[in-house]
Image (spheres, rainbow, N blue to C red):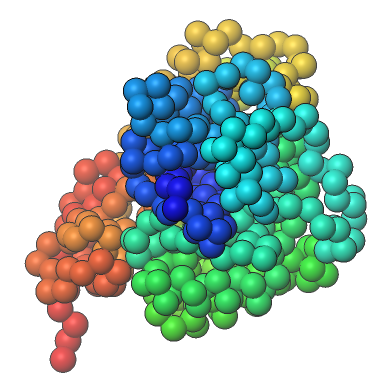
């Protein structure tokens, strides 16, 4: 049996895609191994989002090629977003990779990899705008057969992480046209997965020991629009929360402009659904948001946050912001700063703008000098570190429900995986992974909490 190692970079959506690839490979006779040095072939599931992610992907491919040169794996293969976005261009620029495979290759990944291992040449694809593969009208998309990574068409996942938390891909693609983002061009138009497919996979994940389902997509608030039901997520969430073994369901990647009152209420008040709002604000200055081809303002965002906290005062709210966008002024930055101070968010990612090929903003005038962008990133990173620490201090004395992942460490309902901090629980009675513990917060360090387990009353 040929051995294959998968190295996954980027977001949780890529994690699901890798597990689909792993399931397809294992079903066709490949043995999965954890270490690239032990493999016959290394598949690097790349990220093509921003420049830093692209560099990380290339560096990882080169490191695998170095292992090959030292007598390790016989083949190094690039898959994922970088491979799909650049195709033949990446293959030409990176001859160290034995093949560059696009999304269309996923359905027969075992055959493609077998060919690479036996020396059959592979011609990398010429990239195309994947939005053009599906009708403009969302409800007409179900009639088209287009490869959709992570939708498990005719396949099943193979878990590569035995932890109690797992992503569940809600949908693929995006119909928005944000001026700075290239993702829709290589991920394609928005396509929802059918509810019954999601429920079946949720039950399977629960059988594998998963206690928290994290719903991922490029835009979760669009779920159901191509199924003819704009409120499909409101109906799906309670059903997922009722899956035996599932303790918590978390929704990620919400667009503020699309967050319907009914969906807000469902997330905030449904038992078993984390009152957690991953809201993609990106900025707070209305004029700059318009240049970004986005909607909203500091006032509308604060109103949204107010409505969330009215329904769920302890809800977790996180976001990302971009600084240094073309044309950004000190007045814009002042609006953003004032918004962040008033919003009291639990976690904020700060990103510096850089041009992305094929995006509208790449052709904008009034570019901010990269050195100044770095200064703004540093300025706002320091600000949000202080503000999120203050928000964590507000939770001291409150009771949180912590899902243990690596006892005594876990995450409360307001803490998303990897990016929002953790909670360490003292005086544990049951410290097994996946156990949910009620604990009272007694201190914080930045966004991380220290809590003491509370023994339930008899």
The foreground one among 318 and 19 is 19
**Residue located 34% across and 41% down the image:** 38
Q: Residue furthest left?
A: 427
Task: Report whether 343 appears left or right of 82.
Answer: left
Task: Report whether 430 appears left or right of 372.
Answer: left
Q: Is residue 223 visible?
A: no
Q: Position of residue 453 (x, y in %)?
A: 16, 69
Q: Is residue 185 visible?
A: yes
* In this view, 71 is above or below 402: above
The foreground one among 28 and 82 is 28
**Residue located 70% across and 11% down the image:** 366
Q: Position of residue 12 (x, y in %)?
A: 50, 49
**Residue located 65% across and 60% down the image:** 151
The foreground one among 379 and 197 is 197
Task: Report whether 220 appears left or right of 389.
Answer: right
Which quadrant holds residue 208?
bottom left
Which quadrant holds residue 369?
top right
Q: Residue furthest bottom?
A: 458
Position of the C terminus by quadrant: bottom left
Number of on-image labels = 0
Which quadrant holds residue 224?
bottom right
* In this view, 107 is above or below 364: below
Q: Position of residue 201 (x, y in %)?
A: 55, 71
The foreground one among 337 and 238 is 238
Q: Residue furthest front?
A: 118
Q: Position of residue 315 (x, y in %)?
A: 44, 61
**Residue located 13% across and 69% down the image:** 428
């Amino acid at each position: 049996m040929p051995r294959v190692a998968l190295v996954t970079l980027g977001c949780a959506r890529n994690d699901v895609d890798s597990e689909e690839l792993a399931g397809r490979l294992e079903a066709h006779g490949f043995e999965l191994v954890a270490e690239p040095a032990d493999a016959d072939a290394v598949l690097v599931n790349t990220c093509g989002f921003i420049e830093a992610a692209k560099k990380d992907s290339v560096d990882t491919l080169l490191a695998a090629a170095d292992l090959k040169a030292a007598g390790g794996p016989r083949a190094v293969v690039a898959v994922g977003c970088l491979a799909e976005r650049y195709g033949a261009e990446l293959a030409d620029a990176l001859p160290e990779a034995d093949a560059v495979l696009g999304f269309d290759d996923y359905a027969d990944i075992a055959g493609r990899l077998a060919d690479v291992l036996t020396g059959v040449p592979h011609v990398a694809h010429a990239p195309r705008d994947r939005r053009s593969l599906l009708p403009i009208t969302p409800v007409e998309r179900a009639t088209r057969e287009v490869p959709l990574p992570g939708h498990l068409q005719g396949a099943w996942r193979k878990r590569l992480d035995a932890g109690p938390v797992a992503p569940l891909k809600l949908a693929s693609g995006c119909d928005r046209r944000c001026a700075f983002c290239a993702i829709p061009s290589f991920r394609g138009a928005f396509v929802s997965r059918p509810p019954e497919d999601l429920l079946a996979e949720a039950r399977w994940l629960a059988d594998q020991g998963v206690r928290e389902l994290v719903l991922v997509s490029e835009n979760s608030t669009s779920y159901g629009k191509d199924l003819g039901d704009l409120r499909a997520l409101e109906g799906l969430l309670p059903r997922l929360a009722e899956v035996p073994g599932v303790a918590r369901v978390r929704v990620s990647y919400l667009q503020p402009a699309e967050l319907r009152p009914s969906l807000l209420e469902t997330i905030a008040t449904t038992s078993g659904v984390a009152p957690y709002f991953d809201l993609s604000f990106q900025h707070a200055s209305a004029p700059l948001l318009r240049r970004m081809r986005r909607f909203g303002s500091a006032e509308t965002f604060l109103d949204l946050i107010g409505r969330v906290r009215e329904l769920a005062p302890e809800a977790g709210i996180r976001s990302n912001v971009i600084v240094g966008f073309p044309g950004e002024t000190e007045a814009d930055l002042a609006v953003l700063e004032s918004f962040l101070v008033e919003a009291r968010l639990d976690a904020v990612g700060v990103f510096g703008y850089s041009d992305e090929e094929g995006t509208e903003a790449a052709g904008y005038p009034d570019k901010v000098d990269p050195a100044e962008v770095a200064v703004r990133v540093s300025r706002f990173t320091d600000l949000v570190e202080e503000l999120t620490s203050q928000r964590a201090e507000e939770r001291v004395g409150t009771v949180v429900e912590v899902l243990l992942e690596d006892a005594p460490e876990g995450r409360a309902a307001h803490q998303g995986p990897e990016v929002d901090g953790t909670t360490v629980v003292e005086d544990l009675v049951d410290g097994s992974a996946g156990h949910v513990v009620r604990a009272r917060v007694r201190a914080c360090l930045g966004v991380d909490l220290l809590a003491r387990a509370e023994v339930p009353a008899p």
